[in-house]
Amino acid sequence: MAAGRRRERVTVYSSTPTTNTDGERVESSLKLFQPWVEIQPVRGTEQFAAKQTQSQVTHIVRMMSDSYSRTITPAFWLIRADGTTRLNVVRVYDPKQRRQELELECIEQTTGM
C-alpha cells in the first residue's frame, strides 16, 4: 500500500429514526467515527445489468477495514473535513475479500456551505 494514499479525513454519519412527543417520526443524524480515506472521483455514470437499479456513482471511497467501518451500510453518509461535500453511500464492498480494505460507492451531494 502506497504511503499517503489515505490523506483525507471524513466523518461518517448514520440516520437514527426517533419519535418526538407528538408521535411524529423524526430523523436525527448520529456521528460515528472519523477515518482517513482515499476519495477518487469517477467519470460518468455506472449502470448495472438489466432489471437492476441504476446508480449514478460519483466517487469511490477507500478506507481500512475495521470493526467500525464494517458497520457501514447504504443508510450512511460521509462529510468531508471541509464540510462542503456530503457523500451518500450507495454500495459497500470488500474488493479482495480479505477484510483489509473497504470500497464505498458514493453519490456526491453539495451541502452549500
Image: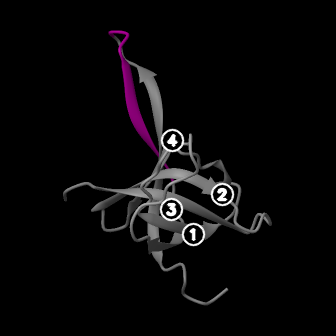
Nearer the viewer's eye, disc 3 or disc 2?
2
- The reply to whether the magenta stretch includes residue 42 is no
Q: Quadrant of the N terminus?
A: bottom right
Range drawn in magenta: 22-32
Residue situated furthest bottom in the rendering = 3
Q: Amino acid at mark 3?
A: Gln
User: Who comes first in sequence, dot 3 or dot 1?
Assistant: 3
* Residue on which disc 2 sits: 93
Q: Amino acid at mark 1?
A: Arg
* Residue on which disc 1 sits: 62
**Mark 2 closeness class: few <14, some 14–19, many ≥20 residues within 10 Å:** some
Q: Secondary structure at mark 2?
A: strand
- The reply to whether the magenta stretch includes residue 28 is yes
Dot label at residue 9: none
Q: Amino acid at mark 4?
A: Ala
Magenta span dominant secondary structure = strand
Disc 3 from disc 2: Cα separation: 19 Å
Disc 3 from disc 4: Cα separation: 17 Å
Q: Amino acid at mark 2?
A: Tyr
Q: Secondary structure at mark 3?
A: loop
Dot label at residue 34: 3
Residue situated furthest right in the rendering = 98
User: Who comes first in sequence, dot 3 or dot 4?
Assistant: 3
Disc 3 from disc 1: Cα separation: 13 Å
User: Who comes first in sequence, dot 2 or dot 1?
Assistant: 1
**Mark 4 closeness class: few <14, some 14–19, many ≥20 residues within 10 Å:** few
* Residue on which disc 4 sits: 75
Marks 2 and 4: CB-CB under 8 Å?
A: no
User: Who comes first in sequence, dot 4 or dot 1?
Assistant: 1
